[in-house]
Amino acid sequence: MNALPAGHTVRPPRPEDAELILGLVHAYTTAVIGFADYTLEDMCDELRRPGFDLERDAWLVLGPAGEPVGYATTNGKSGSDEVDVDVVSADPAISDWLFTRVLGRAREIGREGGHDEVTVDQGVYRDDTALRARVAALGFEAATTFHRMRIDHVGDVPPPAPVPGLVLRQGVDPAVRRTAHEVWNASFAGHFGFVPKTYEAWHEKRESKSTFDWSGLWLAELDGRPAGFATCTDQFTDENCGYVGHLGVVAEARGRGVAKHLLGHAFHLNASAGRVGTILHVDSNNPTPALGLYESVGMRPVLVIDAWRGRLA
C-alpha cells in the first residue's frame, strides 16, 4: 500500500508524545491480551533510547481528528545485520503501510552497516492472531518464544542459602560494572537476537533507563572469578513487582547454583521492598536450561510472546 487512508497523516513522534502514544498502545494490548502491557516510563524511555533517530526510525500515524491510530519503530543492533521492528495499529491498512516503511528502513540500516541482507525481528503476542497472520504473509517465520514468568511473594522471603565460594558484589562500584559487562557479553553469546556491545554502549543504555539504578546490578564471583550477574529493576512497578531484566552465568560456572542464588537474592530484595512478586522473561529455546530453572523455584508463565523473523535482501 503506497498511501494512508484519506484524512490520515504521519509524522515522526516526539518525546512529548509519550502519553499520546501510550494511549494507543494501551488500547491495542488491552484488545489483544486483556490488559495494558506498557507504562509511561517504558514509553518515555523508548523515545529517548540511545541512538534512536526519531526522524528516520519512527512513525506516528494520526487519524482525521488528530488521534493516534498507528505507531512503528525500527531499532538496528550495533552495526550487525539484525534489526528489531515494532508495528502497532488495529487498522489493517495502516499496519500494512507501516510495515512497508519499517521494512524499507530496515533494509537501509542493513546497507548502512555494509550488509546485503538484513534479519528482521518482530515480537508478537501469542494471542495476537491478526499480527501473526500479517507477518506470516510478509514471509516471516516463528523463530523462538519468550515466556513472561512470575512468582508471587507472600510474607517474608529469606535470603538464599550460601553457596560455597560465591560472593555477590553490587554495581555501585564502577569496577564491578566493567566486569559485569564482560560477563554479560560472555554469558549471552549464542542467545537469540543477542549482539555484543562495547562497554560504553552497554553503560549508556543502562543509564538511559528510568527504571534502572546501578544498585540493582549484582555481580556473582565464584572462587574469586566472575561467574554471573543479574539486573534488578523497577520496570513492573505498575504490578508492584520487581523485574529481573537480565540474568546470565558464564559457561564454566553453570550448574553450580549461581543462577539459582542470584534469583533467590532478587526474590529476597523484592519481597523486602514490599513487592508482591518478581517478573522476568526467558527464551524457551535458550541454549541453557533457564526455563526449567525458573519453574523449579516456583515461577510460572503468565504471558507468551513469539519472535517472528524475516530475512530481507
Image (tube, rainbow, N blue to C red):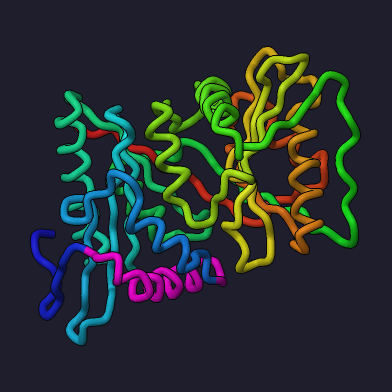
- Residue occupying image coordinates x 52% and y 54%: 126
Based on the displayed image, in which of its 4 quarters is residue 140 positioned?
Answer: top left
Residue 17: in magenta span: yes
- Asked if 142 appears above or below 190 in the picture, the reply is below
Residue 162, percent from left and from top: 89, 30
Range of residues picked out in magenta: 13-35
Q: Nearer the viewer, residue 26 or 13?
A: 13
Q: Count of labels shown? A: 0
- Most common secondary structure along the magenta stretch: helix
Give left or right: position of 50 versus 179: left
Residue 229, percent from left and from top: 64, 31
- Residue occupying image coordinates x 48% and y 57%: 210
Residue 130: in magenta span: no
- Residue occupying image coordinates x 82% and y 58%: 153
Q: Nearer the viewer, residue 241 or 111?
A: 241
Give left or right: position of 19 versus 266: left
